[in-house]
């Protein structure tokens, strides 16, 4: 875990989302599914973001402007600086035989980097609208659906599911045959195990997502 | 001395951060294990944050057998925060810790806003703990009382060696859209910059009332904040919420504290100890 002041290279619109590209500086990109705490200008607490893309010398984060912190991040422009801490937590395991990436909404964020490291496996992605579905451009070999069709309807049996998205989607994906690697989400103050704020109940047990997750492997 | 506020750092997941402090204060330990409160547990507010963790901890048995030996290896002075629901709980844990040479001090958490308040008063808890241990006892008080100086005097009379001021104060955040509480348990403890003036007032009052050494905490973001607490009467300063945003805060705040003291013409920040009171007195005299 390392913290550094990084400079914004670019800020691109992807549907309703923003792809924030920053200079990598001394920060390593880590494994897909790991996350970073991004200083949110004017806010007390940083915001956790998984890495979307890791081009040479760069870290890119896909951000959904849903609150004051994420809006402040989306308002950053080239040349602005922000503190970045990471990489944090546990990412996806890459030793899978038949990978299938499953993403819902802003949950597609870690999938482009994951796809790259897994050699562009197939992906199924679900979105609320065509506008949101513009983010599917970031993920190679993606089959896309828009509500009312649910992404869970597109998941074939017999695949090694690696998923990120809203909780009901994760539960449904997992329900098919049980085994899956799922990236969970929870409000987080610190990202490194200090605040105990990100505890979520999984299989009847409260676990700190920042240190035990955010990617958890679920057995069949 | 620069410490962390209890519950704001896990030394085992972030040992380097713990080593950058002059002492590590554990998360509160209770007699039995506690999972803590149901999520959502934290929420940011405009000038602070709310938490409702609910004293998640492994319980004293596992703490002593598993956690404490690992903490000892860090080589940082250890302050154990102790909690419970009656005075006997505190006494039991204090007696369990008494023989552990690696424990530098015990902080009695008589003021967590996220669990049911202990039935006994702070005075009874301190008195029970005093009988159970020879370790230095620091009473961590809530600012949510009519007269914190009165509580501090009672804690002193019961045998407290010092005071930790302040714990969080209860707050509520509603979701703007649904008008329902954001936190799972409803209300939580407010920390961060919003707490600083409350902490300063509590430290100043208790300094005047007791003369006991005080660990000041509440909204410290910078060395200047720390210097203000020292001027109000804190011997030591603890970092809380700032650690969440900045794990490098101990080194930064320490450097800023030295610089801020120099700006006032002091060779050490210890020279600022209680300085606010001299000014308070002189203002009163001129009136």
Image: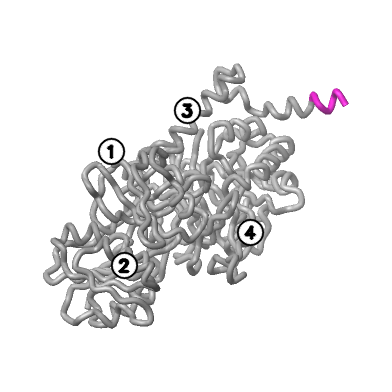
Q: Residues within 10 Å of mark 3 (few under 14, many from 20)?
A: few
The location of residue B14, given as percent across then percent down, is 36, 46
Q: Secondary structure at mark 4?
A: strand
Residue B255's mark? 3
- Magenta range is B282-287
The location of residue B260, given as percent across then percent down, is 56, 25
Q: Secondary structure at mark 3?
A: helix
Q: Which residue is mark 2?
A: A164
Residue that extends furthest to the right in the rendered view of this protein: B287
Q: Which residue is mark 1?
A: A26
The quadrant where residue B281 appears? top right
Q: Which residue is mark 4?
A: B171
Mark-to-mark CA distance, 1 and 3: 23 Å
Letter of the chain that mark 2 sits on in the rendering: A
Confirm whether the magenta stretch covers residue A210.
no
Letter of the chain that mark 1 sits on in the rendering: A
Mark-to-mark CA distance, 2 and 3: 42 Å
Q: Secondary structure at mark 1?
A: loop
Task: Check contact, mark 4 vs mark 2: CB within 8 A.
Answer: no
- Depth-wise, is mark 1 or mark 4 nearer the camera? 1
Confirm whether the magenta stretch covers residue B283.
yes
């Amino acid at each position: 875990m390392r913290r550094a002041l990084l400079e914004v290279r670019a800020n691109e619109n992807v549907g309703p989302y923003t792809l924030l590209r920053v200079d990598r500086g001394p920060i390593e990109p880590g494994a897909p599914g790991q996350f970073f705490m991004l200083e949110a200008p004017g806010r007390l607490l940083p915001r956790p973001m998984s890495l979307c893309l890791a081009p040479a010398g760069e870290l890119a984060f896909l951000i959904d402007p849903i609150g004051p912190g994420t809006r402040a991040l989306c308002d950053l422009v080239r040349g602005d600086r922000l503190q970045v801490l990471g990489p944090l937590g546990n990412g996806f395991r890459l030793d899978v035989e038949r990978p299938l990436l499953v993403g819902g909404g802003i949950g597609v964020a870690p999938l482009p980097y994951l796809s790259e490291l897994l050699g562009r496996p197939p992906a199924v992605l679900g979105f609320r609208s065509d506008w949101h579905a513009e983010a599917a451009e970031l993920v190679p070999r993606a089959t896309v659906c828009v509500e009312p069709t649910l992404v869970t309807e597109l998941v074939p049996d017999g695949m090694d599911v690696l998923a990120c998205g809203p909780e009901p989607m994760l539960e449904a994906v997992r329900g098919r045959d049980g085994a899956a690697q799922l990236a969970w989400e929870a409000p987080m103050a610190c990202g490194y195990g200090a605040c105990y704020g990100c505890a979520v109940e999984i299989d009847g047990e409260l676990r700190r997502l920042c240190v035990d997750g955010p990617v958890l492997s679920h057995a069949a | 001395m620069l410490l962390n506020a209890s519950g704001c750092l896990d030394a085992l997941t972030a040992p380097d951060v713990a080593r950058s402090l002059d002492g590590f204060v554990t998360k509160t330990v209770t007699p039995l294990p506690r999972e803590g409160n149901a999520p959502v547990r934290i929420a940011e507010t405009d000038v602070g944050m709310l938490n409702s963790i609910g004293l998640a901890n492994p319980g004293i048995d596992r703490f002593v057998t598993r956690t404490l030996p690992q903490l000892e290896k860090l080589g940082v002075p250890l302050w154990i925060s102790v909690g419970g629901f009656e005075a006997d709980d505190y006494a039991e844990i204090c007696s369990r810790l008494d023989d552990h040479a690696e424990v530098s001090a015990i902080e009695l958490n008589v003021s967590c806003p996220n669990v049911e308040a202990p039935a006994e008063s702070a005075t009874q808890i301190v008195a029970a703990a005093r009988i159970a241990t020879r370790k230095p006892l620091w009473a961590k008080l809530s600012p949510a009382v009519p007269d914190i100086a009165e509580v501090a005097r009672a804690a002193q009379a019961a045998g407290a060696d010092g005071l930790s001021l302040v714990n969080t104060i209860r707050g509520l955040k509603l979701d703007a859209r649904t008008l329902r509480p954001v936190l799972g348990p409803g209300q939580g403890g407010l920390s961060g910059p919003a707490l600083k003036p409350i902490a300063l007032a509590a430290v100043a009052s208790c300094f005047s009332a007791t003369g006991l050494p005080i660990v000041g905490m509440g909204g410290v973001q910078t060395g200047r904040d720390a210097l203000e607490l020292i001027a109000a009467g804190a011997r030591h300063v603890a970092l809380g919420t700032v650690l969440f945003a900045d794990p490098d805060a101990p080194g930064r705040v320490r450097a800023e504290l030295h610089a801020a003291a120099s700006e006032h013409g002091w060779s050490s920040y210890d020279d600022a100890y209680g300085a606010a009171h001299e000014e308070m007195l002189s203002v009163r005299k001129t009136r």
